[in-house]
Amino acid sequence: MTTLIGLHGFTQNGAQLRQQLDPIARQLPSDVELLCPDAPHACAQASVDRLYAAWGAPRQPPPYLCWWDATDDGRSYRGWETTRDRLAQLCERQDRVLILGFSQGAILTAGLAALSAAGEFPKLAGVVLVAGCAPRSDLLRPLFERPIALASMHVWGERDAMAAGAARLVDAFEAASRDSVVWRGPHAIPSEGPAASAIVEFVRRSAYA
């Protein structure tokens, strides 16, 4: 059995991500299980208000959760250790693990991939990074000084403000085991079209590699 662990974005929660991933999940093999855990930390209300004001989008229902609270300069991730330890325990209970991260969840996934490749986190079969960038944390940045030896799929939208960072993240992974696809959308997970199909194919391939 392969488990695909989905890691949501900042201010989101596991239920929201599962709903967003449903079009992709319905195309996966029956022996691939999707788990979308909640992040362990509540977002500060001011952060939630500021983000939704910037988006200009209808507010989603709570809880508003995050994997860490970054300092203003991004050099420290408060709550990182709790997140890392909880996800390590979750991964250890699975037979074979793939991780798909979106936005802050993709930054987290990149960090976990680097830790796994360094033998400091449970073994991963591959990662899908959607609309994310490399971690800025002083604790994690040294892990990105050499290419990460782990199968990876990188996805971002042409109209995403994080597109440049997502494109740079590709180079953090070994060229022989990485793929990337750009779609026409904004800061979101593609639900159809070539980008969504690329995610499905990567998960199918990695689940049995």
Image (cartoon, rainbow, N blue to C red):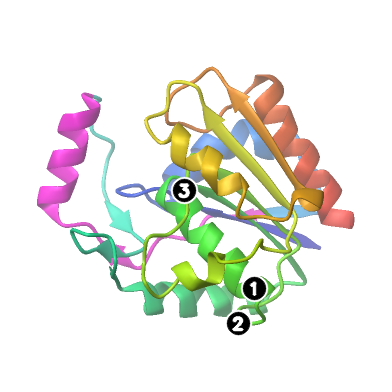
Rendered view: 94 above or below 99: below
Amino acid carrying mark 1 in the image: Ser
Residue 148 x/y as whole percent: 67, 63
Q: What's the residue at 47%, 75% (across, down)?
A: 84
Tell which tag, 1 or 3, sits nearer the viewer.
Answer: 3
Q: What's the residue at 66%, 27% (across, down)?
A: 195
Decide if residue 26 is in sight here: no
Location of mark 3 (residue) = 133
Give the left or right position of residue 152, taking residue 189 as reference. right
Residue 59 x/y as whole percent: 23, 33
Tell me where residue 40 sits by quadrant. Answer: bottom left
Rendered view: 184 above or below 171: above
Circle 1 crowding by C-alpha within 10 Å: few under 14, some 14–19, many from 20? some
Location of mark 2 (residue) = 120
Furthest toward the front, the residue is 145
Q: CA distance from mark 2 to mark 3?
A: 21 Å
**1 or 3: tag closer to the N-terminus:** 1
Amino acid carrying mark 2 in the image: Glu
Location of mark 1 (residue) = 116
| Residue nearer the viewer, 170 or 82 | 170
For the magenta stretch, what is the residue range? 34-56
